[in-house]
Amino acid sequence: MTDSALDRGAVDPAVDEPTQRLYRVPLGPAAGWTAEPSRRRARVSRAILLGLLLAQAVLSLRLRNSAFEDEALYLYAGHLELDHLVHGGPAHPEFLRYFSGSPYLYPVAGAAVDSVFGLAGARALGLACMLGATALLYSLTRMLFNERVALCAAAAFAVAQSTLFLGNFATYDPPAILLLALAGWAAVRTARSGTLLASLLVAPPLATAVAVKYASGLYLPTVAALAVLAAYPHRGWRAVGRAVGIPAVVAGLLGVALAGGGRAHLAGLTSTTTGRAAGSDGLLELLLDTLRWVGPLFLLAVLGTVLYARRERMGELPPAPDEAGSGRSRTGRLLLGGLLSATALLAPAYQIHLHTGTSLHKHVGFGLLFAAPMAGVAMSRLAGAHFRRPELAIVGWVVLLVLGLAQSQDRYHVWPDTTRLIATLRPQLGPDRHYLVGANWVPQYYLRADSRPDQWTSTYSIDYTDRRGRHLTGDPAYRAAVADGYFDVLVLNPVAGGVNRALARQLRGDARYRLLAALSYRQSSGGAFYRVSYGTGSFQVWVRATPAPPS
């Protein structure tokens, strides 16, 4: 019997069982790591994948809260763009200046779904994207390794905090992750194809991902390098052309889009991505957040890289010269594993550089998508050939599951439920009224049918001309607007300090205004209490008790 046959799991009747155990020869059929195709294994694998996707959907849909400010902003902007495109309403070019992706792509698609199915429908669109990303991750991992590793990779990614959170969230991130997954899948799927064909198939979803969310460009080198490493065993040094071809086609596609009237997007690209202002978050805080949200899966990916670099196959015997395999050398295996694992650190490294933790819990999901295949290798190797040590892989996955459940639940409650606030504001609306609200995109989104954008002012910035004709900005403008009786409804949070606290004091001494309601952050619409991460507080809703004076 040949070494190749032994390594594939065949049992030689001439070799007794003690000898087989002594030399660690497999005692039964191969446990899913051989290169030979198997229809039965494929069917079982896909059935398990379907179960994983259903579990991922259930775990994401368990999250409950009203719209987050970013969700409200993007969906409201999408509704305004739809109104402009369909009904000839006014254009809103200001979104181009500070959106982190094109306002003409995801916001419009999300708003179209929201128009029919509401916020739940828009969030379901995000869930479909995350489920699609998991399925594509499974497929590309199966092509790189095998079904068992692919299932482990999908299981690890499906329960990550960012995956569960984004599976019930209506922002740019889920479609961008789906497009990156599609680009990665195409990079592996075209491993045997020529450079030109590979570039033409990989570049479009990658360019679209960058257009949907500008920060996706951070992962362009990963996809291009993955295309090279996946193709090298089949194409040799000719595969290196992908490292130039894919970025060149992506640049060409984006250049055509900009030349076609999209140059205004450069302002948003600069302000949100390439020239983003630095924050003030401390290094230790950012490192701890990275450790919580990335650390467990990243450590599994590193372990998978080490184990894969040491031995390509799980079989205890080395593969025979005539055995089918990937053909990767130890260096190639180390490069592939290192590339995929290190990608998990790109978003944390970039945000540490900027000293900002804003949205880091979402952005880490982009890198975890690429690190998951190596985490799958680790879990498969921990389980062992013929599942000799399944408890090790199970423990590793349960840790990921518990952390993902707790962290996604925690992140989904960092903003207060605004259901009661919206119900309180709705009767106060009127065609000639003006409203001051801190995060006013949320009420604008919910109350868009009964109000106009020009009626809303936030507590972040204001340009106001008082009754004496003085043009004011900042705190003096807010105080003058209240003194003039400009606002009919004000929603303040005195705990936040600053202008909120100053205006609350001013309103208490103004007989024209009365406190309509104080709605605690900690009280949800269903009567249950939950923690809001930035502390306790309340929405103070003030309304005019007397009619506003004529302008």
Image (spheres, rainbow, N blue to C red):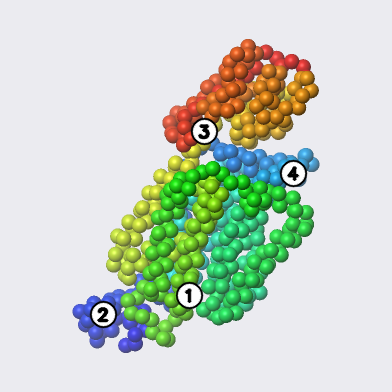
Residue type highlighted by circle 1: Gly
* Residue 413 horizontal/vertical position (percent): 48, 38
Asked whether disc 2 touches disc 1, contact meaning CB atoms under 8 Å apart, the reply is no
What amino acid does circle 4 point to? Pro
Mark 4 lies on residue: 93
Residue shown at 71% from the left, 18% from the top: 484
Q: CA distance from mark 4 to mark 3?
A: 30 Å
According to the picture, the residue beneath numbered tag 2 turns out to be 23
Secondary structure category for the residue under label 2: loop
Q: Residue furthest top?
A: 511
CA gap between label 3 and label 1 equals 50 Å
Q: Is residue 261 above or below residue 511?
A: below
Q: Position of residue 121 (x, y in %)?
A: 58, 44
Q: Is residue 284 above or below residue 433?
A: below
Q: Which mark is residue 332?
A: 1
Front disc: 2 or 1: 1
Who's the residue at 29% across and 81% down the image?
Answer: 11
